[in-house]
Image (cartoon, rainbow, N blue to C red):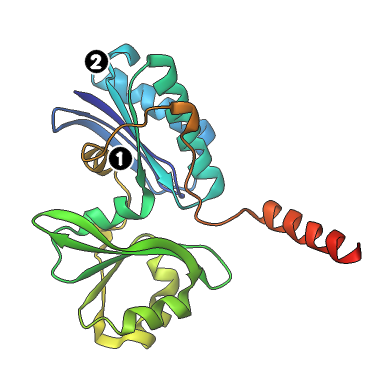
Amino acid sequence: MIWLGIDTANAPLSVALVQDGRILCEQTSSFARTHSIQAMPAIEHLLKEANLRPADLEAIAVSQGPGSYTGVRIGVTLAKTLAWTLKIPLVGVSSLEVIAANAVPFEGVICPIFDARRGNVYSGLYKSKDERLHRIWVDRHGSLDEFLEDIAVIDQPVLFIGVDVDIHKTKISAALGEQAVFAPFPQQLPRASQVISLAEQRVPTVDIHQFVPNYHRVTEAETNWLNDQKQVTSND
């Protein structure tokens, strides 16, 4: 089976083609570029390099969130459009899980981190077992301080991984000391081939139209609207 993998959930962009467990080609960049402009040309370039046509694709895997609202939305929209047009299966994978999978195998707990501004993060906890990744806490959005308090009670090393870890490294080290381990830079970037590897373990989306991003929190616009509604209700 020929898979196309897409990850645009954050600043890095990664696309890959995988056939029957073999990476045909993969492109990953950490430059903060506009995914709406760069993603499709990157896919077209990979297809050309592999001497494939869009019609040769048999399934699509996409990083479904959380992450940048714009980035997640672009990747999901692109994946849905291609899957619908080509009439092929679509599978979504947690963006945090994609990063965590880079650390398999690790003897301890794996904690992917995405910065969410204002002292908040997107994060999750995973465990490597039998060469596969297992989620032990659900992915979440919230205060880094509260998350570190929860992690502190775990009597195991915790590997922090992701391009945004450096933003919070000082606070993590102060809170956890030697319990905190930091992944080397080759493991920090998302890889679209990893998206595909995880997608192969899942059931494809049946109704592509119902496939939506997993933001894990409401947008600022939604928050403002809800606050406005509460204000109107209180005035009534």
Q: Residue at x 23, y 54 (%)?
A: 102
Residue 132: percent from left, percent from top: 15, 53
187 lies above or below 198:
below
Q: Residue at x 36, y 61 (%)?
A: 138
**Left or right side of 103 for 74:** right
**Label 1 element class:** helix
Residue 161: percent from left, percent from top: 31, 64
Q: Residue at x 38, y 60 (%)?
A: 163
User: Going from the N terminus, do you reach mark 2 or mark 1 first?
Assistant: 2
Residue to which mark 2 is pinned:
51
The mark closer to the camera, 2 or 1, is 1
Which residue in the rendered view is the most extreme toward the right?
A: 236
**Left or right side of 73 for 204:** left
The image quadrant where one finds the C terminus is: bottom right
Q: Amino acid at mark 2?
A: Asn
The image quadrant where one finds the N terminus is: top left
Mark yes or no: residue 185 visible: yes
Residue to which mark 1 is pinned:
192
